[in-house]
Amino acid sequence: MAVVLPLLGALFFVFLLAQAFGWATRRLGLPALIGEIIAGIVIANFVVGSFDLENWIGLNASSAQGVVSRDALTGLADIGVIFLAFAVGLEVLPSAVRRFARAAASTAAWGTTIPFALGVALVIALGGTGRWSAALFVGVALMVSSLTVTARILRDHGLLETDEAHLMLGAALIEDVVGAMVLTVVFAFTAQSVHGPVDLVYQAGIVLAAAIAFIVFFFYIAPRFVRRYAPSDPSAAPARPASGPVFVLAILLCLGASALATSFQLASIVGALLAGMAMAEVRDRYDLRSGFGALNTFFAPFFFAGIGLLVSVNELVATWPLVAALTGLAVVGKLVSVPAESRHLGRRSALRVGAGLVPRGEIGIIVAVTALGAGLITGDYYTAIVVMSIATSAIGAALVLYLFRDAPGPGDRRTPAPDAGGAERGPGRPSGPA
């Protein structure tokens, strides 16, 4: 009991504050994740005299038995982001994403190259060519998009079934895979790997091959296996959400795909999202939404609160010009990167897709943590990347809600089937009789 009690107390207060701030931001019309991130910032920075909220909660100190509450919180956050990505994948049918594959690839191509170039140019302009290692990592932080944050914004507001959402998620998935490859190469290059350029090419090739294998397996093979093992019968009553062999299969597929993705230097959330998409066709028959929704009610707040814990208000005040410049380029870089190919679908739809790719969230933070841990960026750039990742999550959420303010209700947001002759309606336009 002496070992468990400090940990339980820390988890209780973090969860309580995350829920309270999440409720407050929902009342303001913003996603709960913004409030949960703010809760982490408050916990890490609220000091009055000798009172330190983080110490009072017990996140800094180890107990006499060696239990580190902050490490436990990090573990819960890591599990939370995996379950959250899986739940998002449940909302996305692979067939729907395949319909937008070409547009998603084109969007991702522009959405990675333009922000990367802007980030590198900013750091070189501020610090000269001597900051080239920081410039590369800043470029990587700007080129990625947070699949998880974007998907949660869409899910919280009933937008996951829009055509724009499928295009956003497809593009974000490609950007994360490309970002993982570029991060691998940049990290090895800036760390002056002793294995030489051949090893760099080998590492990049492994990541690319793993990404292709993952996408092919979870888009084409896994759904067939799921249909055979868990046949969908719309006429039958749903099974219990958190019991039965199908729910066990879903958890095993989620954890296994996440672990396998990590072993191949891909983000764990990429594996979890693809695993969720593989189970999407049987989600209603077995009520998988409710089961993973219950898991995310507990785990997800720890993930977003953990992001806020990384922010120091003192460092933020000292680096605010850099933070402002980086955040501005991050937003503009995504908004202007939507390719002309998508604009025939309408200016508003193109802006919606660009806004959905603005959040950097946990992906940008992973880049910052990786670079700082290797000693390849200084504390000012670390703080700037972390705060930019949080700020773009809030800005992206606000932009998405603003641009979708006149969209049809959730019941009308169905992904349209192709018209006769293979033509498709533009994003955001519900199917149905003319």
Image (cartoon, rainbow, N blue to C red):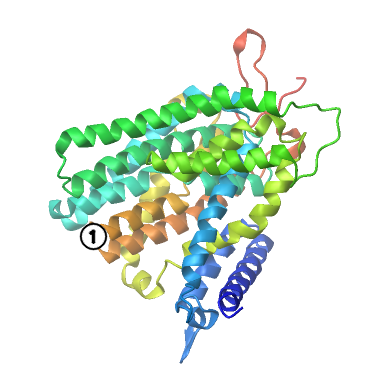
- Image coordinates of residue 288 in percent, x first then y, are 71, 41
Above or below, 205 against 311 in this view is above
Above or below, 65 against 221 in this view is below
Residue density around tag 1, few if under 14, some if 14–19, many if 20 or more, within 10 Å: few
- Image coordinates of residue 250 in percent, x first then y, are 64, 39
Q: Quadrant of the C terminus?
A: top right
Instruction: Please give the name of the residue rendered at 20% of the width and 36% of the height, measured from the top-left corner.
Output: 199
Q: Quadrant of the N terminus?
A: bottom right
Instruction: Please give the name of the residue rendered at 76% of the width and 27% of the height, measured from the top-left corner.
Output: 232
Residue 339: tell me if it is visible. Answer: no
Instruction: Please give the name of the residue rendered at 52% of the width and 65% of the height, measured from the top-left corner.
Output: 73
Above or below, 358 against 214 in this view is below
Q: On the image, which quarter does residue 76 sit in?
A: bottom right
Above or below, 240 against 311 in this view is above
Instruction: Determine whether, in the image, residue 195 is placed left or right of residue 405.
Output: left
- Image coordinates of residue 212 in percent, x first then y, are 42, 27
Instruction: Please give the name of the residue rendered at 30% of the width and 30% of the height, measured from the top-left corner.
Output: 205
* Nearer the observer, 51 or 238: 238
Judged from this view, the residue extending furthest toward the bottom is 49
Three-letter code, disc 1: Gly
Q: Secondary structure at mark 1?
A: loop
Q: On the image, which quarter does residue 221 sit in?
A: top right
- Image coordinates of residue 230 in percent, x first then y, are 71, 29
Residue at image mark 1: 375
